[in-house]
Amino acid sequence: MSYLQENRIKFFYEAVQHGSVRAAADFLNIAPSAVSRQISHLEQELDTVLIERHRRGIKPTDAGEELLRYYKRYQMQQEILLDNLKSLRGLQSGTIELAVGEGYINITTKVMYEFSKLYPGVQIHLSVHSGNDILRKVIDDDVHIGIVFNPPPHPKIRSHYSSFHPMVVAVGKEHPLNAEEQPLRMSVLKKYPIALPDMAHGVRHLIAEVENETCITLTPNIISNNLTALHCYAASGGVTIIPDFMIRGMPDWYHSLNCLLLKNERLNKTDTHVISRLGRQMGKAPSTFLKMLISRIEKELVA
């Protein structure tokens, strides 16, 4: 980058990422005035305004958004170059960025452990997010790989692997729903206290769509963004709705709960996708991890 100074673009990038010049300065451990000065120099070089200042911080202009895309492409190409050079010596170092839904933590960490035994020099960053945030992070190249539940089609997303699995009603072994006619009708769930995920979770969005289609509304007694809390509620005598693999993948959960199918085609055809941004080139480390991840999912989620 001979004309544009990379360091100035980095200051601009961090200011946008953190939402304010002061927050970026704290992250970079420098004075806020230094960050502002470098952004001003960058705007002068490009002869355009890159950020808009608001009471709550800053946001990029259209020109700023274009520069952000450029900088991310530059970072990605630099990463691929360094990764390819390292691969000539074997996978001795590198970084992998992952974003997954909460229900995939168990299977992902198993793969992380196996990968780390083979390639101890590679560092893996795992973050847990809602489905929409995972899609955004993948599209923005913040992560190499995402695992997401029942995502909508997106022109910028590539699905490397997908598998179908049903949603189930999870209840304790002695719950009265075990004696109801199977598969369960949605309407029968209204008779019992039920816990559901919040609207940030793809599970809840799907349930809401089915409620609209069937004109049956479930009124949850408990709403949580934590799947473990939903499991504990069901194990304590309540009811929840959850993808079956999230129960099967956790032995303690599996042995304490029964998984009852619902009489609804949409709820029996939900899916998991392993994704990356369409067109993104991956280095050796994330590509190798991706293959191991898909292999593990095929064994556990489809079993």
Image: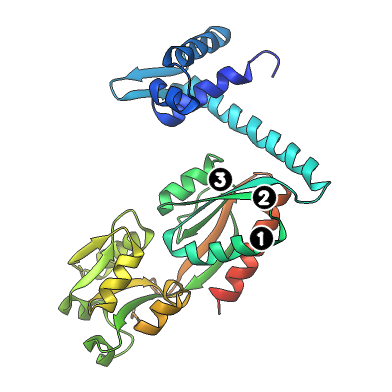
Which disc, if any, is residue 143? Answer: 3
Give the left or right position of residue 212, taking residue 168 as reference. left
Q: Residue at x 45, y 61 (%)?
A: 149
Q: Position of residue 101 (x, y in %)?
A: 45, 58
Give the Cα separation between the discs numbered 2 and 1: 9 Å
> Residue 295's x, y, as percent?
65, 68
User: Where is residue 302 shown, x and y percent of the image?
Assistant: 55, 76
Mark sitting earlier along the chain (2/1): 1
Which disc is residue 122 wearing?
2
Residue at image mark 1:
115
Disc 3 from disc 1: Cα separation: 18 Å
Q: Secondary structure at mark 2?
A: strand
Q: Quadrant of residue 159?
A: bottom right
The residue lying at 66 percent from left, 60 percent from top is: 115
Count neighbours of disc 1 (C-alpha within 10 A) and say few if under 14, some if 14 to 19, many if 20 or more: some
- Element on which disc 1 rests: helix
Question: Is there a contact, CB below 8 Å, between mark 3 and mark 1?
Answer: no
Please identify the quadrant where the N terminus is shown.
top right
Q: Would you place residue 293 above or below residue 284 in this image?
A: below
Q: Residue at x 32, y 72 (%)?
A: 231
Distance, label 2 to label 3, CA atoms, is 15 Å
Which of the 4 image quadrants contains residue 195?
A: bottom left
Residue at screen point 27% across, 76% down:
234
Q: Position of residue 11 (x, y in %)?
A: 52, 21
Q: Are marks 2 and 1 in contact (CB under 8 Å)?
A: yes
Nearer the observer, 264 or 90: 90
Q: Nearer the viewer, residue 164 or 287?
A: 287
Front label number (2 vs 3): 2
Tag shown at residue 207: none
Q: Amino acid at mark 2?
A: Val
Q: Amino acid at mark 3?
A: Val
Three-letter code, disc 1: Phe
